Amino acid sequence: MRDIWRDLQVAARRLRHSPGFALTVILSLTMAMAANLVVFGVFQTAVARPMGVSHESRLWMVVQKPHGDITQSYPDYQDYKARNSSFSEMAAYRIDQEGLGVQGHVHMAWDYEVTGNYFDMLGVRPELGRFFHASQIHGVNSAPYVVLSDHYWRSRFQADPGVVGSIIELNQHPFTVIGVAPPSFHGTELFMWPDFWFPMVNAPEVNGYSYLDKRENHGLEVIGMLKPGVTVAQAAQSLNAVAAQLAREYPMTDSEMGARLVRPGLLGDALGNTAVQFVGGILLLALLVLLAACVNLASIFAARATDRTRELAIRVAIGSSRWRVLRQVLAEAVLLSALGGAAGTLVSAELLRWLSEWRPIAEYPIHVTVTAHAGVYGMAILLAVLSGILPALLTTRQVFRIHPMQAMKPGGGPAVFRRLNLRDVLLGIQVALCALLITSSLIGLRGMSRSLHAPLGFHPRHVMLAQTSMRFAGSTDASALPVQKRMIEEASRIPGVTAVGTVDALPMNGGEETTSVYGAATRSFRNSNEIASARLFEISPGYLKAAGTHLLAGRGFTWHDDAHAPKVAIINETLAHILFGNAPAVGRHFAEPGPALYRVVGVVENGKYSSITENPEAAMYWPLAQSNESDTTLLVRSNRSDAEIAKALSGMMAKIDPLLPVTIESWPSALALALFPARVASVALSVLGLLAGMLAITGIFGMTSYAVARRLREMGIRAALGAQRMQILRTSMGRAASILVLGSIAGLLLGAVASRVLASIVYDASIYDPVVLAGAIGTMLLIGVVAALVPARRAWQVDPAKLLRED
């Protein structure tokens, strides 16, 4: 131990005299490790999905057999719960937004509507007060209780313990606050933090409509706690037996339902698989950045060992063992690993803390919660040791091949670059990884740029939105229409406004509905008879003009398309082709579950409805006056500034109903949710590309500098014998240039594969985009020029007379 301590002291003294070397190694380790630890922390959270509940490993989510269908109806949940034999308990929840009123002030807040057994099944204990229980539920609207989240309690009620027992209003209906959840519990969706919970049986009172008795109304997420000893396969078999019974009993709604079990926490497999695959891919790229850093460090350690050849040879010549010499070299690596690992861990801890406090979209309760568990710090120690010591071990061969007499001669030392060696291969890999990451980042950035000008089927520029719901003020769907009409009339009177309309849910905003479409002659509305599943939007007259959606045939809606008129609809090009082929669609009919037929009065252009990367989907529009929908987004197109229209809309809404909470923003800002995955991908890939570029610059710089330094005497002789400077430059830089070209080509080929993976997140991701190709080639060329500039200058200015006077 004394010898090791002495070696570390000697290593510290040597590093103090080589600050450039030490700083380069520490910074390389810090950047690469910080990137890896942050991504590893996010990946661990996405895989483990910690929710702060007891028996978490036995908790599973029940989704439908078709992938992407994650929700159930309340009657189906009740049947699953009563008839299955594999779960000790099952609960259901639904995320929604309500108008929460406190002492006359109303604002929008996010809630979980949950079954009465929700908290008991999860084993959560209140921080303050109590929770509601299944025994307190005695039918519809029988439990007007609210449990606040700790975050909401502290931010809105200043952590006042007196809030327990107080009365608040949900959509103008009184509820009693009975408790506060613990700080560690944020619901059963990992990144969706609610402001409060209330019993699902009171949803009819709060929402103004009831889904509790509608088997066709799917919107609940169902989770269950497996009985001890029951496997996932056994539970799935039990649930599918129940699903088969329900299909026989309710063929109109449950004929093709089925059941699967997935891990809860990320909206089932609707988001979970995509999130894990994406973060896993980013983790792989981050590990490749770390590999590039290790290649750099290997080159640096090898160059340092070569520069110290004469010193090490003298040590061997005067009796030091080669193991002792190697141990001193490794002592430097250990010390640098510890410093780089500590710095990387501190940086990553701060980044993870910032990430956990980040609210990416202010309108939604999204918290990117990342907890640095012991595994993250264990990973930090492992990466620090491997990243620092393994590159240093590559110098072992140099130490053991030192020949004291040969090394102490002038110009002695190992021959350099006589043939392809390990350093060439590693540098080629590093350049290829750099080209891959830079190409991927350019694809992400190009996709973001193109998405801003993508054909969306609407034109969001110069449109302001006022988003609210009539139920926030206690209105029902049936009583909402007069207020919506007044909103449109008042907004149309604002100077500078050119078009006004409403829609129940904005496209690409996460709230759109779907409905089944059948042929006009269909009388049996089974799933098997369905022709298409279409996105459904309920719009007012004027919406198409306000949204900038082009009407290709027929007409738009009028206020005469009301409850007393025949059912009408506007469909998009895709649905028109599915229903009627190439024949004209206007005037034709189709059916939707129910007795009435819908007559097509117009056809509009295709658009994007749920995500920027989706393929063309079927969509239809119903007139607001025939659908009675309380959720309302007012679209106001104008030629005035956003600030002016926002101020006018705020005053207008306050005049219509001062207790109706409303969110006013521009339409481009409201698209933040749809563009969020692409933005995250672009930022992550850009950061990794930047790190890879920096490491590639230092790697190529190190290789060319090392080559020039070791061959200066040879270049002096060549110059003295008449070689031209360009020949000398080509000789010294040729190998690095070849590696740069071959590595870049390999990276571009890998980028073609990466573009297919990115296509599900980034709009129109393609490596064949001329801008991406030119950008990637230009960037790699710039990296090569920057990295080789100083060594090339040194080779260009070689002075034969000065070099040949050496020793």
Image (cartoon, helix red, strand yellow):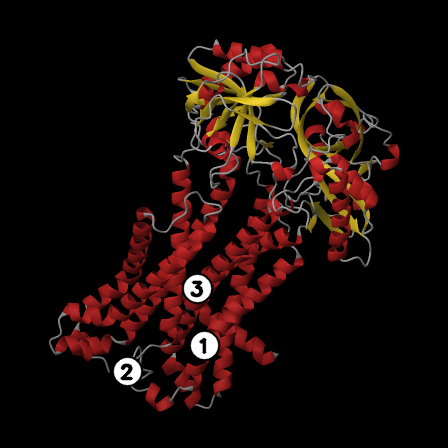
Residue lying furthest left: 722
Q: Secondary structure beneath disc 2?
A: loop
Query: In the image shown, does 343 or 102 lie closer to the viewer?
Result: 102
User: Tags 3 and 1 in contact by the CB under 8 Å rule?
Assistant: no
For badge 1, the amino acid type reads: Leu
Q: Position of residue 321 (x, y in %)?
A: 49, 88
Query: In the image shown, does 342 or 311 lie closer to the viewer?
Result: 342
Q: Position of residue 695 (x, y in %)?
A: 40, 60
Determine which of the numbered discs, if any, sits on residue 292 in the image. 3
For badge 3, the amino acid type reads: Ala
Residue denoted by label 2:
411
Determine which of the numbered discs, if any, sits on residue 108 in the image. none
Whether residue 220 is visible to the viewer of this picture, yes or no, is no
Q: Earlier in the sequence, mark 2 or mark 3?
A: 3
Determine which of the numbered discs, if any, sits on residue 394 in the image. 1
Rendered view: 512 above or below 726: above
